[in-house]
Image (cartoon, rainbow, N blue to C red):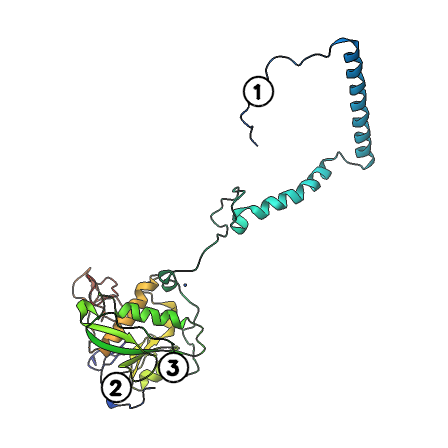
Amino acid sequence: SVHPADSVDPYDYDAVTDWRAASAARPPAGTDGAAPPTGTPAQAKGAKGRAFTGIAAAAVTTVLAVVVAGQVAEGGDGSDDLQARSAPEQAARDARDPGVNGDTGDERNTSPDAPRAAGPLTYAQKMDEKYPLGATAEGSGKFDAVPGIADAPGKGQRVTYRVDVERGLGLDGALFADAVHRTLNDNRSWAHNGARAFERIHSGSPDFVITLASPGTTADWCAKSGLDTTVDNVSCDSAATERVMINAFRWAQGAETYGDEMLAYRQMLINHEVGHRLGYNHLSCDKDGDLAPVMQQQTKFLDHDGISCLPNAWPYPKG
């Protein structure tokens, strides 16, 4: 982002002026544990016992002969038939396997790649995900205000804002609005120590409109304030208008300086651009290993002039 006062920086894209003067329009199988038998099997007693035993043995022999004959006639040894009969049982066991559908039961499948049942994502999880959106995306240029209001939680200077999202982005507007409200009213943000209280409204005349828009639409609105966001594909405070523009590509994909730390990056993005609207200019850290000020252009760089800064999302990181 750049501020007009930072004219020495040709890549400085944010400005802070009074937009009202320029525009009146306000538009988530084992054994069972029994002891093994001991001693020897009991013998049949007397001639009748011996005769009965002989008859039973003959009957068993006859049955076995019939079974073997049937298997030979079918050209097999019976193993294929046993496998076929066990297949449905195996399928039933697979269906109960928690590695397949998350049910409890057969826990044989312990592969870390097996799908797991999951509940709804939390706010932090949603905010830490990247979302598909191209660096050259162009939108409709038309906006919808996110419905609903969110009261200012503090008693400091009341600052009202509206959240607009460009139509057709495919991003979660309600999540964006929630992020704005949580971030700005955090004690580490511009509401620090009760200095301000940010209130989201849906209609009327807010102090500013924080707007999530495609790179193309962001560039159009920033140009209204003499700012060029096409270099480095950044966001801006279009200070000659009512809009603080958040580039949806950056919101969805982040920046190399923050890697996969999307939650922190998005908090920084909101704090930085709204900081311009509140009158704050660009800064840089002046000591190696220090936190970058939130007004440093962290989308573009963390290191400068041989100094290495650490990423920081907050105006008052210690709270």
Closest to the observer, 299 or 113 = 113
Q: Position of residue 1 (x, y in %)?
A: 28, 76
Question: Relative to 217, is 16 on the left or the right?
Answer: left
Q: Position of residue 105 (x, y in %)?
A: 53, 43
- Mark with earlier residue (1, 2): 2
Closest to the observer, 82 or 295 = 82
Amino acid beneath label 3: Thr
Q: Residue at x 69, y 39 (%)?
A: 83
Tag 2 and tag 3, C-beta contact below 8 Å: no
Q: Residue at x 36, y 71 (%)?
A: 176
Question: Relative to 117, is 206 on the left or the right?
Answer: left
Q: Residue at x 80, y 27 (%)?
A: 63
Is disc 2 surrounded by few (<14), some (14 to 19) or many (20+) residues within 10 Å? some
Amino acid beneath label 2: Trp
Which label belongs to residue 36?
Answer: 1
Name the quadrant containing residue 268.
bottom left
- Which residue position is annotated with label 3? 217
Q: Position of residue 5 (x, y in %)?
A: 19, 81
Amino acid beneath label 1: Pro
Compute the Cα span from label 1 to label 2: 91 Å
* Image position of 106 with respect to 115: above or below: above
Q: Is residue 111 something that shows in the picture?
A: yes
Name the quadrant containing residue 246.
bottom left
Q: Position of residue 180 (x, y in %)?
A: 31, 71
Which label belongs to residue 122?
Answer: none
SS assignment at label 2:
helix
SS assignment at label 1:
loop
Single out the residue that lies furthest toward the top.
Answer: 46
Closest to the observer, 207 or 125 = 207
SS assignment at label 3:
helix
- Which residue position is annotated with label 2? 19
